[in-house]
Image: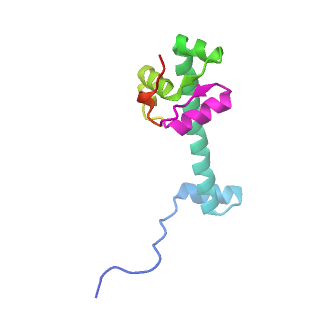
């Protein structure tokens, strides 16, 4: 007979911190954990957005182009940001697009999908 049980996976034990938070707030522990995760994600998003804004401002030529509403190829923008701030090398294109949209900044996107094959001169 197999030694593993079949059926529903076991729930992981709650941490004392999650239980205490839930009791203090009058919510279920699973809700408290979800709220905690959402708060951490929001804090991380704010940190990345601040890093993006600071990095763009440090690259004065790029910053001026954005202030003058010159459309900049999204691939060029990602490359320049990654060169200035290594922590941003893994930044996804969608996350960068959301940031630029929120800031009201203009960017261009290559239709071919291959950013290196763009015909910008």
| Residue drawn at x 42%, y 29% as measured from the top left | 117
Place of residue 54 in the rendered image (x, y in percent of width and height, measured from the top left): 56, 20
Between 57 and 26, the one nearer to me in the picture: 57
Q: Is residue 105 magenta?
A: yes
Between 43 and 91, the one nearer to me in the picture: 91
Q: Quadrant of the N terminus?
A: bottom left
User: In the picture shown, does residue 51 fall above or below 66?
Assistant: below
Which residue range is magenta in the image?
Answer: 92-112
Place of residue 116 in the rendered image (x, y in percent of width and height, measured from the top left): 41, 28
| Residue drawn at x 54%, y 15% as measured from the top left | 62
User: In the picture shown, does residue 76 fall above or below 99?
Assistant: above
Residue 56: quarter of image: top right
Between 55 and 33, the one nearer to me in the picture: 55
Place of residue 23 in the rendered image (x, y in percent of width and height, measured from the top left): 66, 60
Residue 22: quarter of image: bottom right
Between 67 and 88, the one nearer to me in the picture: 67
Relative to 120, 66 lies left or right: right
| Residue drawn at x 68%, y 56% as measured from the top left | 24
In the orientation shown, which residue stands out farthest toward the left? 1
User: In the picture shown, does residue 36 fall above or below 28?
Assistant: above
Q: Is residue 55 magenta?
A: no
| Residue drawn at x 57%, y 44% as measured from the top left | 40
Place of residue 32 in the rendered image (x, y in percent of width and height, measured from the top left): 63, 56
In the orientation shown, which residue stands out farthest toward the right? 26
Relative to 40, 119 lies left or right: left
């Amino acid at each position: 007979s197999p030694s593993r049980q079949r059926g529903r996976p076991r729930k992981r034990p709650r941490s004392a911190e999650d239980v205490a938070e839930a009791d203090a707030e009058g919510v279920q522990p699973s809700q408290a954990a979800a709220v905690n995760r959402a708060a951490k994600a929001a804090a991380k998003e704010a940190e990345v957005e601040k890093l993006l804004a600071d990095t763009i401002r440090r690259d004065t030529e790029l910053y001026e182009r954005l202030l003058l509403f010159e459309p900049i190829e999204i691939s060029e923008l990602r490359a320049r940001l990654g060169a200035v701030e290594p922590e941003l090398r893994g930044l996804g294109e969608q996350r960068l697009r959301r940031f630029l949209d929120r800031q009201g900044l203009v960017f261009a996107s290559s239709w071919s999908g291959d950013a290196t094959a763009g015909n910008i001169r």
